[in-house]
Amino acid sequence: MTLNREHDIKNLELATGGRYRIEWAEREMPVLRAIRERFKAEKPLAGMRVSACLHVTTETANLMHTLQVGGADVVLCASNPLSTQDDVAASLVTDYEIPVYAIKGEDNEIYYDHIKAALDHQPHITMDDGADLVSTIHKTRRELLEGIVGGTEETTTGVIRLRAMAKDGALEFPVIAVNDSNTKHLFDNRYGTGQSTLDGVIRATNLLIAGRTIVVAGYGWCSRGIADRARGLGGNVVVTEVDPLRALEALMDGFRVMPMAEAARVGDIFITATGDINVLDVHHFEVMKPGALVANSGHFNVEINLKGLTEIAEGAPKLVRPYVEEYRVGGKPLYVLGEGRLINLAAAEGHPASVMDMSFANQALAAEYMVKNHADLSSNVYTIPLAIDNEIARLKLESMGIAIDTLTDEQAHYLSQWEEGT
């Protein structure tokens, strides 16, 4: 189906509530506000059409407004069928005149129809959260490639996909891996994912974390945050890994480490955040304790083998609470949260605005960098320059009223030479 509408959202009448929440989030986004003020004066994105495929949240709305103020012609679609906040979508259309194609709970067909609608904007810049825009362009909308100067990518999963494309020689334009910025993955992935994931699990279930065994799959930056927050709430945390270095780090950080086949027998709540498929598989479901809960905080809903679970389950799953489905396996109940999709956005509101402030500062400045430098970039995956990364950190500290030391000339000279020793 082809959408011939200026937007496709749930209900425009939700706009007022969405505007209030967007403004509330803005209070916690001082770095993005500072960038917006400069963008307003300089218009670095003038004449640029931007198609963004991101979670439609209050924080994303503030990014879209910043790009718009900077001169960009912006269109937004959802990067996950369950991550849209319908009131925010309504406000973006009504109050900011930004076309949005996103409805919470949309099926897979409509999800890709919305991506097609965003691409009909004929973007000069793509802004992705999972690389679905970029992959769709390269697979089915190759006529758009000539007009694209570059893109940005927000997530670990998306960067993995893009690097695979670059390795295969399939990537046709430069993309900045925003996720690789220190002011993104060290904060958004760790503190944002950690807090928002547990928030999603608790909102969906209203269960007490303290005293329960929480199995966290993976020990990348997202999983570290989840494990740390779960421990902070009193959980007994088990980490599973395939990387020996990360497994060793988890052990040294005080967590139990074991294979998932063992953890499956002892866990009460399972949370995946690896970016890979079938991290929780049929043989794990078969040995889980009655009442075990399964959630995913990775970008795509492939980490839990839901097809395999459905095949071994007795009868159809039963919705017992919003975002909680009960499957019966061998007579015991198992519970899947948020359809196996991003639990922090399916059942909660995603990351707090104060951490997305830095992530979306990276997005805005990456777009500006791409406009200024695309002619010098080949079709590859790049990291945002360290100077921009450090400036975001400086602005964040300044907004918090925190001052730090600077090197004296003598100290700077000492660090730049090799002659002086003991």
Image (cartoon, rainbow, N blue to C red):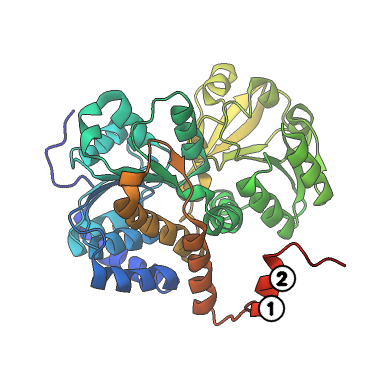
Q: Is residue 290 above or below residue 63?
A: above
> Residue, x 31% and y 74% (percent of image)?
37
Horizontal side of 396 relative to 274 (left or right) equals left
Q: x, y (%) of residue 170? A: 39, 25
Residue 127 seen by the camera? no
Horizontal side of 73 relative to 377 (left or right) equals left
The circle drawn on residue 358 is none
The kind of residue on which mark 1 rests is Glu
Outermost top residue = 311
For the residues labelled 1 and 2, say whether their Cβ atoms are less than 8 Å apart: yes
- The residue to which callout 2 is attached is 414
Could you tell me which quadrant the N terminus lies in?
top left
> Residue, x 25% and y 66% (percent of image)?
16
Horizontal side of 190 relative to 156 (left or right) equals right
- The residue to which callout 1 is attached is 410
Assign a secondary structure to mark 1: helix
Residue 264's quadrant in the figure?
top right
Q: x, y (%) of residue 236? A: 78, 49
Q: x, y (%) of residue 158? A: 46, 38
Q: Is residue 403 above or below residue 44?
A: below
